Amino acid sequence: RSGSTIDGLYAGLFYDLKFSRKIYLQPHLLFTMSGSKFKEDENKVIQHANYMEFPIPLSLRFPINEKDHFVLNLGPYIAYGVGGKTEKQDSNYNVLQSFQTFNILRRFDSGIYTSIAYANKNNSNYFFISYKHGLMNTNRLPNIIENGHNWSIRIGFNISFNILDGMNWILVLEDRSI
């Protein structure tokens, strides 16, 4: 089967829990949108999935100067599917079948989350590239999707609001997910 990913956006919050000048715990709460397109016989299948994700990475900060630092994050994530739609279309783009994505995917996922970032002292500028890899096979129907492990590469930035000290909003520019 040939397939491709559908770009999606995500948004959420993260919090910096400081243990030392260089070591933080950075739990996230994210709403993510992802999907894929693939062929099944002569038909096209378009799948959209929305998740609530909760990565909990250990965050290591390496100073570049007094205000800026390089950030390396690594840790587990869990995710729960909250919605999505899957459509099967014929070659003329007529919808043959439409159903909830989580009728064929398991809602729960977990795996490894990692990222590298540039951040200034107060995280008001925070640019990152992240990767997550699901360790669970979320596919319920192996004859349709052979590899049911989620993965994504994200490029993003945050917008800092002083809701609570250390809490930041995340807005993402691009999300390559499957």
Image: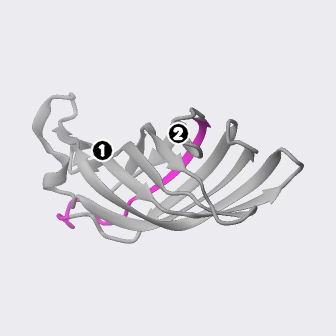
Q: Which residue is mark 1?
A: 50
Instruction: Based on the picture, tell me whether residue 9 belongs to the magenta stretch.
Output: no
Mark 2 near mark 1, Cβ–Cβ under 8 Å? no
Q: Residue at x 29, y 66 (%)?
A: 146
- Give the mark nearer the N terminus: 2 vs 1: 1
Indicate the position of residue 65 as horizontal and vertical percent values: 89, 49
Label 2 SS = strand
Left or right side of 79 for 57: right
For disc 1, the neighbor class at 10 Å (few under 14, some 14 to 19, many from 20) is many
Task: Tell me the amino acid under the disc marked 1.
Answer: Asn
Q: Which residue is mark 2?
A: 170
137 relative to 84, above or below: below
Q: Which of the two residues, 87 or 63, is positioned nearer the viewer here?
A: 63
Q: Which residues are magenta?
A: 140-158
Label 1 SS = strand
Q: Which of the two residues, 92 or 134, is positioned nearer the viewer here?
A: 134
